[in-house]
Image (cartoon, rainbow, N blue to C red):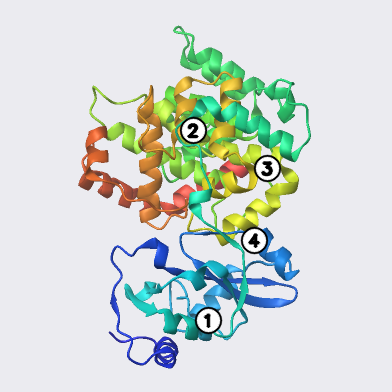
Amino acid sequence: MELPVALQTALDRLAPELTLTEANGLPGAAVLRMVLLEDDQGQLQVISRRQDLVDLAALNKSLSRDLRLISRKKYARILAGLELAADLPALPTLTGLATVVDTRVDDMPEVILELTDQGACVRLDKPAIDALLADARRCNFAVSLAAINVNLAHPENDREQLHSALKRFTGLRIQQRLDDTLELPPLPETAQRIIHLRVNPNAVMGDLVDVVESDPSLAAQVVSWASSSFYAAAGQLRSVHDAVSRVLGFDLVMNLAMGLALGRALKQPSDQPEGYLGYWQQAIWQAQSAGILASMMRRTERPAFGLAYLAGLLHNFGYLVLAQVFPPHFKLACRCWEVNAHLDTSVVEQYLLGITREQIGAQLMSNWGMPEEINVAIRHQKNPGYEGDHAVYAHLLWLGRQLLIARGIPLGAAEEVSDEFYDRLGLDRQKVAEQFDDLVDNRAAIMAMAGMMNS
């Protein structure tokens, strides 16, 4: 296998007799990971076990620095200079930067360097490890995932965890009702009116049009949405009535309006993690994917399209809540999400805050009296093994996320999807793949739709 010159030179310098093997099914405990950081004092690189969480606060405290992940632009330039495309292997000599290594690495009898671009790896024994890290500074900054217990399957404990987190970070009295403790706004009036429409069996299109038109900003967004290239409406749309009757339909507009109304109830955070999609981009990708998957299920088992779509729109609502509830700590969370992009966001949130966005988002939805299908979808979207009531909505969100990640949409850490999971939903894996290929091919239209949400 021919390697870029810089990479081959670094490996030869380490140990000329090293051999490359295929990187299939690597044991996570042995794989090393190198991350480039920077602050106003300059750049450095840190090395830890891939399966660990990098505690940026602990690292900064030890080094008396204010480090964060190096910018994507700078990182891309470094990769290009080394003729690499994906990631830097954990070879400190590639960059020549000062190196800090987590102390746990010294206890490993063997480590693996993954060469992502080549789909290969190199195994190092203890003498080679010592040579690799001979000039590195040692520091205790990584946390084993075994020490971080994310609550995926026990929602009955959510309120207690949330109160503990609030007490820890805000000092507020936990005797208050959750609504008051969180200091969050009430359910927006537009959302309240839509909920009333949802439960009214006699509701007609005119009722929905009246609700949407009562909010000029919402009305403009619905018309713009229906006019987008994604829906390719024939002829000019002049009104909300046209958008509902000719393009989007009653159910989609009702749930779109609900998602917009709730999304505007909280401010978008000014500080956001670099490399992650914005709130509305994530919302649109997940809503479209949930709608596609729901429509492909067997008719007798198919969930309500509108609720699946709304679950996608609101799946990341807890992110907005975290920014509002824990503002002093949200900045740290952003920096930690960036450095630990290989881990699911819930792991970082559990470690830093003691609560995840899924838990806190579902709690608020429950307080607001949202449909139980939505509460379940938000709460259990990271738990593919959930089997309770309305589990299908959570499964659609989980599967949609994995399908999008596999196609290069940065929505978090990737997980394997088994054939059995498709069977549980009655979905044809190949047909689903084709639909998602088409969806991702429409990336420009999705981005345009997300831009409308921000206006």
Tag 1 or tag 2, which sits nearer the N-term? 1
Residue topped by disc 1: 133
Image-based side of 395 in relation to 73, left or right: left
- Give the label, 3 or 4, closer to the camera: 4
Residue sitting at x 31%, y 52%: 437
Tag 1 or tag 4, which sits nearer the N-term? 4
- Give the label, 1 or 3, closer to the camera: 1
Q: Residues within 10 Å of mark 1 (few under 14, many from 20)?
A: many
Give me the C-alpha separation between circle 4 and circle 1.
20 Å
| SS type, badge 1 | loop
Give me the C-alpha separation between circle 2 and circle 3.
17 Å
Tag 4 or tag 3, which sits nearer the N-term? 4
| SS type, badge 4 | helix
Residue topped by disc 3: 323
Tag 3 or tag 1, which sits nearer the N-term? 1
- CB atoms of marks 2 and 3 within 8 Å: no
* Relative to 448, residue 102 above or below: below
Question: Which of the image's four quarters has the N terminus?
Answer: bottom left
Residue topped by disc 4: 56
Residue 389 locus on image (x, y percent): 38, 22
